[in-house]
């Protein structure tokens, strides 16, 4: 079965092999050396002063950032299930917050955030997604961060890059914390979360550690010594080093970003050539998200007849959205076959005759576009 869901993504064989070696203890020089390697790769990937690793899903990193970087009032951008989650975390801690709520295909308006920051000095942190994967949407995070910092430099900009890190180069110049997870573009099993931090965020954390398991001050102190406050996810960290080495062997981050961008663009063009509507107004490069009344039927045909597993939607678009993953080292032929299968499914549903349009357009756009 070809897995092209936007997380978890397939784990490459070389990474699986690395993680199958005998377990080592996390309080040993051997593991500290591996942990140091992982930290080096992550700092390069995030392009930030520090990157912390947490043994949790990405939601744990989201919670840690709310807990450690917002002291008075949060501004939360909700354009999908994961933006909504930031608000729910604030509620769980009794933290005051204001929410900007949009349709799941609509990026947040920069000026709306600017006006809120100008008029409410109690807001000290903004939480939003780089890519809101519920609908495959890209928010203008970098522009927001730049404009907010010009108004009030002390406001923390916290960006969920769980489906953006490893997909595209993110300008972190004005971003204070950037979150990601292992099971997306880094093609690892779930269970490891990352938080990139700049100098301003580090100063706040070091001056005010809060919480217990998600106390980033405690974690920072330990990880700077190449160990962890609590039991490390040793196997996943070993896999992370192997995955980063594989990315380097495949041409490095710049090639990964370029290939992902080409694959996403060509896929959207092919889907549009089949008559589909791309759902988000500003599509992210991590996935292609299509809104169609027969989305659930198409997904079922792909899985049962053509051996391809793609994702559906959630909540109000559960049965009318399908999403094709572009994160990680996806082979061109895998995406080409998936699009071919989508076109075959349309023919089976009587929606259009099969004529090879999807493959032709995808191949032309990827190699010649």
Image (spheres, rainbow, N blue to C red):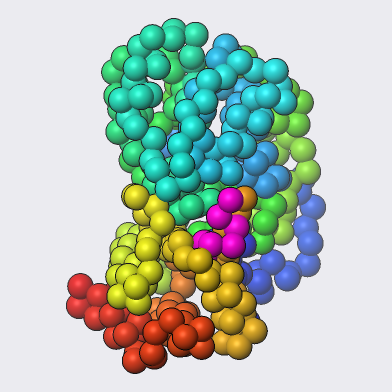
Q: Whole-percent x and y of residue 321?
A: 52, 61
Closer to us: 206 or 342: 342
- Residue 257 sits in which quadrant? bottom left
- Tell me, yes or no, whether the highlighted magenta stretch contains residue 305: no
**Residue 69 at x, y = what percent?**
56, 22
Instruction: Give the residue at x 54% y 38%.
Output: 83
| Image coordinates for residue 339, horizontal then vertical, percent | 43, 79
Say how many tags the image has.
0
Viewer-nearest residue: 112 or 133: 112
In the rendered view, would you say 346 is above or below 189?
below
Above or below, 48 against 307 in this view is above
Magenta residue span: 316-323
Residue 86 in view (yes/no)? yes
- Quarter of the picture holding the C terminus: bottom left
Q: Position of residue 15 (x, y in %)?
A: 61, 69
Question: Residue placed at 43% from the left, 81% from the top?
Answer: 351
Residue 320 lies in the magenta-colored region = yes
Position of residue 247 in the picture relative to residue 319 (left or right): left
**Quarter of the figure with the N terminus:** bottom right
Q: Residue furthest left?
A: 368
Q: Is any part of residue 168 visible from this angle?
A: no
Quarter holding residue 84: top right
Question: What residue appears at the point 57 percent right and 81 percent down from the top-left corner?
Answer: 302
What residue appears at the point 61 percent right and 15 percent down from the top-left corner? 96
- Would you place residue 266 above or below residue 49 in this image? below
Image quadrant where residue 259 sits: bottom left
């Amino acid at each position: 079965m070809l897995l092209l869901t936007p997380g978890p993504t397939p784990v490459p064989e070389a990474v699986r092999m690395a993680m199958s070696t005998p377990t080592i203890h996390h309080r040993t020089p051997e593991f500290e050396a591996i942990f140091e390697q992982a930290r080096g790769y992550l700092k390069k990937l995030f392009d930030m002063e520090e990157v912390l690793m947490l043994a949790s899903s990405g939601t744990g990193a989201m919670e840690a950032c709310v807990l450690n970087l917002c002291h008075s009032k949060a501004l939360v951008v909700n354009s999908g299930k994961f933006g909504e989650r930031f608000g729910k975390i604030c509620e769980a801690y009794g933290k005051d917050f204001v929410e900007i709520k949009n349709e799941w295909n609509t990026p947040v308006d920069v000026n709306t955030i600017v006006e809120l920051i100008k008029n409410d000095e109690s807001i000290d942190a903004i939480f939003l997604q780089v890519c809101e994967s519920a609908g495959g949407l890209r928010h203008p995070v970098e522009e927001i961060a730049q404009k907010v910092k010009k108004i009030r430099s002390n406001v923390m900009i916290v960006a969920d890059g769980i489906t953006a890190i490893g997909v595209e180069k993110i300008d972190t110049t004005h971003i204070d914390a950037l979150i990601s997870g292992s099971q997306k573009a880094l093609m690892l099993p779930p269970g490891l979360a990352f938080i990139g931090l700049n100098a301003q965020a580090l100063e706040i954390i070091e001056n005010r550690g809060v919480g217990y398991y998600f106390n980033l001050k405690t974690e920072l102190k330990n990880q700077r010594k190449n160990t962890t406050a609590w039991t490390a996810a040793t196997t996943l960290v070993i896999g992370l080093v192997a995955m980063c080495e594989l990315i380097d062997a495949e041409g490095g981050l710049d090639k990964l970003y370029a290939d992902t961008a080409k694959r996403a663009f060509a896929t959207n063009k092919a889907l549009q050539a089949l008559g589909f509507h791309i759902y988000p107004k500003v599509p992210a490069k991590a996935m292609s998200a299509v809104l169609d009344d027969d989305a659930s039927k198409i997904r079922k045909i792909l899985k049962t007849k053509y051996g391809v597993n793609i994702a559906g939607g959630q909540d109000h678009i559960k049965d009318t959205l399908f999403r094709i993953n572009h994160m990680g080292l996806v082979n061109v032929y895998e995406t080409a076959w998936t699009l071919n299968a989508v076109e075959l499914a349309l023919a089976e549903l009587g929606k259009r005759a099969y004529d090879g349009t999807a493959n032709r357009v995808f191949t032309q756009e990827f190699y010649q576009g």
